[in-house]
Image (tube, rainbow, N blue to C red):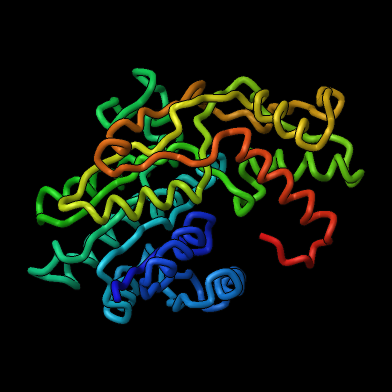
Amino acid sequence: MPRALITGITGQDGLYLAELLVSKGYEVYGLIRGQNNPKAELVARTVPDVTVLTGDLTDLSSLLRALQVSRPDEVYNLGAVSFVAYSWEQATLTTEVTAKGVLNMLEAIRVYAGSDAPAVRFYQASSSEMFGKAQQTPQSERTLLWPRSPYGVAKVFGHYMTINYRESYGMHASSGILFNHESPRRGPEFVTRKVSLGVAAIKLGLQDTLVMGNLDARRDWGFAGDYVDAMWRMLQQPTGGDFVVATGETYSIRDLLDTAFAVAGIDDWTPHVEQDQRFFRPAEIDVLVGDASRAHEVLGWKPTIDFTGLVTMMVESDLKRLADGPDSGLR
């Protein structure tokens, strides 16, 4: 039975990945920060077969203990301070967790595994935010990185550190440069879930308006459940590498609003949407769209759910959740 350790298991990616690995016969361990983490119950309910360990990406000794207990064949580093807007408010914390946390995990694996370091396969959750002020469209593994947020800068550090450990120590280390990926499990602070929740609440008469930022930014949105499959495929390759994971299609926030409100049966959303400068980024990224040709060719991976299907899934899920009440247990 293969064994895997997942950091960031309480997030949408961690939950979907844990479900995927359990279905493939893995013994799965999940790292949670703090002994009284309120999200521990969510993990226990969603993936009860996962063994939860406590640890912190900023604490190397706790990572070593987690490795000694889990004895993993594969480590998936999904843990991060992942809300981009928050990274301007907490740049130091974002750097400690999202950047140096990657180094801590890589070093913990190197120390734990010793001369057998290549036997522990490592996945790093890199991000399309690393492209920032994109120098070409679409963006591929060869596109110059030009991050436009503290979060993007931190992800660039982790990305290059992963490459460095692969080249310096022969580690089987891969980075998935994932473009925006969403699901009903997405946190409500992210724009897609903010929209799906807001639209559902407006439809049910629970609120009147949705306050947004830049409506013209364009993103490449896919389904998180598809993207964790790409993560797993990377660690099944003979050697580590870097892969863009994306749909190759781009939509604006206006397109997102069009689709979400249409799912709820509301044709004209303009009376329900306000813009507020507080939700504009200090340094905006106008367009991100990925070229996942390498993932298609090498990994045999392709997305299964398109933009309309994704937004429909999210709005319908939030309509049910709100209609059933806050204690419905739907996530």
Q: Where is residue 247 in the image (x, y as percent from the top left)?
A: 45, 33
Q: Is residue 184 left or right of residue 165?
A: right
**For the N terminus, which image quadrant?**
bottom left
Residue at the extreme left of the image, as rendered: 115
* Figure quadrant of residue 112: bottom left
Q: Position of residue 214 (x, y in %)?
A: 64, 24
Residue at 29 percent across and 46 percent down: it is 175
Q: Is residue 86 left or right of residue 199?
A: left
**For the C terminus, which image quadrant?**
bottom right
Residue at 66 percent across and 32 percent down: it is 279
Q: Where is residue 314 in the image (x, y as percent from the top left)?
A: 67, 45
Q: Where is residue 92 in the image (x, y as percent from the top left)?
A: 44, 49
Residue at 20 percent across and 49 percent down: it is 240
Residue at 24 percent across and 67 percent down: it is 108
Relative to the observer, which residue lies in front, 226 or 328?
226
* Figure quadrant of residue 293: top left
Relative to the observer, which residue lies in front, 54 or 172?
172
Relative to the observer, which residue lies in front, 59 or 118?
118
